[in-house]
Structure formats: C-alpha cells, structure tokens
Amino acid sequence: MIMRTTLKGGQPVVLHSILTSITFSLLLLITTIGDLTGCSFLSSDRMVYNQAGIHIGLEGDPTIARSHQLVLNNHPLDLTPHEIESLLQPIQLIGYSGTFSGLITKPQPAPLFTPQELSTISKHLAHALREAKPDERVSFSLPKPGVTYSEERTVGSLFFRGPYLHVVVNDHSSIIRTDTGGGDYKDIRDTKGMQLGIVGADQAAAVPPIEEPRWAPFDRVHISLVVKELSARKGTTSSARTKQGRTDSPVSLPTATSPERPQGSTSPEEL
C-alpha cells in the first residue's frame, strides 16, 4: 500500500520507502528478541559451583548430537571425591608457551590439576556427575594457581561413556598464550600445542573407532581412560551403594588396551 501526504504546495509525497524501512526494522528487532529468548530456553548449561574464580557446571555434550548412532553418557554417576582424584591425578600435559623462552626451551610436563586443585574441585565434580543428564558433560574452568590475577585458565570438560572416562582440555593455565600483537584477545583455534598423557605404568586407552566420540571442532585435545565397574555405578546413590554392601574404594585406574594411541594424547615417555 502506498500512502501519500500533501505539502502546502499541493505536491504529493510518497511514504512507501519510509514505511518499508520502519517495518523491516521492527521485524528485525522482533526476530532478534525471539532468537535471544529461544537461546535462553534451549541452552542446557547449568552452573553447579561458582566460587573463588572456579566454575564447575554442566553443558550439553556436542559429541552426542554429532554421533551417527544413538549414544548416551553414563550419567548420572555416583563417584566419591577420592575416586575422582585417583582418576584425574595421573593425567599430565605438555604444550608450547607463546613467550620467547617457550620457543627455545623444551616444554616440561605439568599435571592437569595440581594436588590442591584436585582437593578443591573433586567434591564439586562428584556433585556435578550426580546431577548430570545422559546427554550432558561436566565442564570446568579454574584460575591459575598461586597468583593473585592471571588471564590464563585451565578449561575443559569430562564425561563417562561406556567403559571410558573422556577428558577434553581447551586451555591450561601453565602455558602462556601466544601474543596476538594487539589483535584479538585470543585465537580460539590456538591449542598451545597441548598433548595429554598418563604418568606411571598406565596408558591412555585406544578407543575403537565405533566407540570413539565424534569430537566437536574445538575438542582437539583429549584423552580417554579405561575405567572398570562403571556399569554398576550408573545412576546409583551413596545410600543405595551402602545397602548393596559396596565400599568407597577407588574405582580401577586406567589400564592399557592397545599399543596404539588416540589422537590428542601421548605416552608417558614422550612427556
């Protein structure tokens, strides 16, 4: 519809273009509001612990949506803090610092979590696993230990599926990020050359292709560990476990399943 108005000189002025512009702006605004509202309802991220810069939460597991077959995680899962510490303590990593010294020195292995970090977060990870849904994984983000302020953080996620514990690391506070020269705050594609490995006699599991998660684009640094007795733990609670006569002894630690290594991991000798 074309609307006209008449000026004093009697000449008509067409307002069609003005109304079209206003209509388009309103539609764009409504669409944007709808998208934001929809995102808030569709997002499954949940915060479980948020204190002293430590964030433990639950997020939708992207490897499930990307899978060509129906897969679910062993969640909810009841593990004690001590069991979680026993599983995560052997994991170490190496990476390349973005500083000049990092370019000329050999990278040294560092634990994924320090003993103090594990002692602090293990109970919150246990709580998150009890709250997790089968299509969720536990996320973690920790500040750099021993300093008042640092932009470096340890960030990643973990989930249990089948006989495996899968751990994803997106960033680690022990490795200084590459200087972007005043450009972007951080290149999300920069994994700092990180590789994960297991300390001691145990080795990372070589997951068969049919069981290997279909990793998301930024889940490039990951490691898988074999954990026994998980099927008996899925969906149980501490009270139910007591009635069944179970003890709080640690679950079996990872064992080698194949001389092959999964992508994103390395052997203890290489660390």
Image (cartoon, rainbow, N blue to C red):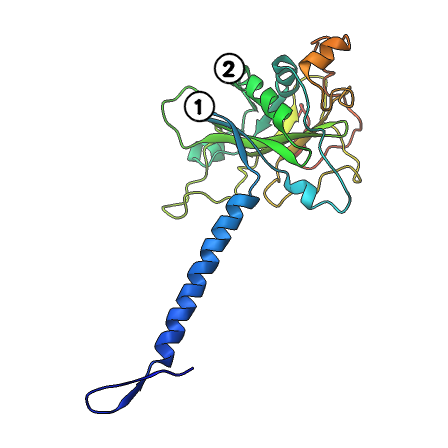
Furthest-left residue in this view: 8
Residue 101 visible? The answer is yes
The disc labelled 1 sits on which kind of residue?
Gln
Q: Which residue is mark 1?
A: 51
Which element carries disc 2, helix, strand or loop?
A: helix
Does residue 38 lie above or below 87 as drawn?
Answer: below
**Labels 2 and 1: the sequence-earlier one:** 1
- 58 left or right of 164 in image: left
Nearest to viewer (mark 2 / mark 1): 1
**Splitting the image into 4 quarters, where does residue 267 fall?**
top right
Q: Nearer the viewer, residue 5 or 179?
A: 5
Q: Where's residue 54, x and y in %? A: 47, 25
**Splitting the image into 4 quarters, where does residue 152 fall?**
top left
Classify the position of the N terminus by image quarter. bottom left
Classify the position of the C terminus by image quarter. top right
Check disc 2: other Cα within 10 Å, few if <14, some if 14-19, many if 20+: few
The disc labelled 2 sits on which kind of residue?
Gln
Q: Where's residue 247, x and y in %? A: 72, 8
At 49% from the left edge and 54% from the top edge, which residue is drawn? 34
CA distance separating discs 2 and 1: 15 Å
Which element carries disc 1, helix, strand or loop?
A: strand
At 20% from the left edge and 91% from the top edge, which residue is drawn? 9
Q: Which residue is mark 2?
A: 116
Q: Where's residue 233, x and y in %? A: 74, 20
- 261 left or right of 197 in image: right
